[in-house]
Amino acid sequence: MSLDGTYDEANIFALILQGKIPSTKLYEDEKTFAFLDIMPQTRGHALVISKWSKARNLLEMEDEALGEVMATTKKVATAIRKALNPDGIQIAQFNGAPAGQTIFHLHVHILPRWEGDPKGFTAHGAGAQADKDALAALAEEIRAQF
Ligand code: AMP
């Protein structure tokens, strides 16, 4: 699946929004949802999604939904900064499989970065799932900063 296609109501992020699979929530409002990436590429790697848009990628996204997702991205990045004190924060978003997109519900990655750490990003995920309890503890630290 690439830039063109049909929104899959059973994609992983849709299932998270429906409460059918668990996630480590950081923030939620009426329109958006933010949670920790299950295969973090840096400590505090988070994802932000729209709760209502069926856009698979940026090219399909309603301007209103984009604005909502980016406003939440800023809020979550600010909380991550307070909690984890990174030296930089990378915001990433992929469109289509050749660009590294694996889940076709638009999402924005927030990646805190530290001086001296590797800068790379592995398209198609980091490969290893984080420890569930460690993710939960980290989420608590970040949630305390909203
Ligand atoms: P992308 O490559 O931009 O489509 O990113 C998809 C991201 O979703 C990857 O970084 C995955 O590690 C992450 N991911 C996959 N499944 C889950 C899940 N159940 N909960 C949280 N993050 C997930």
Image (cartoon, helix red, strand yellow):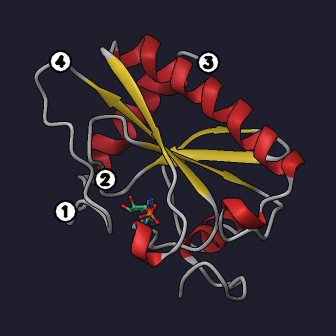
Looking at the image, residue 90 lies above or below residue 62: above
- Mark 2 or mark 1: which is in front? 1
Measured from the top left, where is residue 34 in percent x and y? 60, 44
Q: Quadrant of residue 102?
A: bottom left
Q: Nearer the viewer, residue 104 or 12?
A: 104
Marks 2 and 4 in Cβ contact (< 8 Å): no
Q: As shown in the figure, which amino acid type bears the numbered disc 1?
A: Ala
- Mark 3 or mark 1: which is in front? 1
Q: Mark 1 or mark 3, which is nearer the start of the sequence? A: 1
Marks 3 and 1 in Cβ contact (< 8 Å): no
Name the residue tied to disc 3: 146
Q: As shown in the figure, which amino acid type bears the numbered disc 3?
A: Phe
Q: Give the quadrant of the C terminus.
A: top right
Name the residue tied to disc 2: 132
Name the residue tied to disc 1: 128
Looking at the image, which residue is at 52% across and 25% down? 77
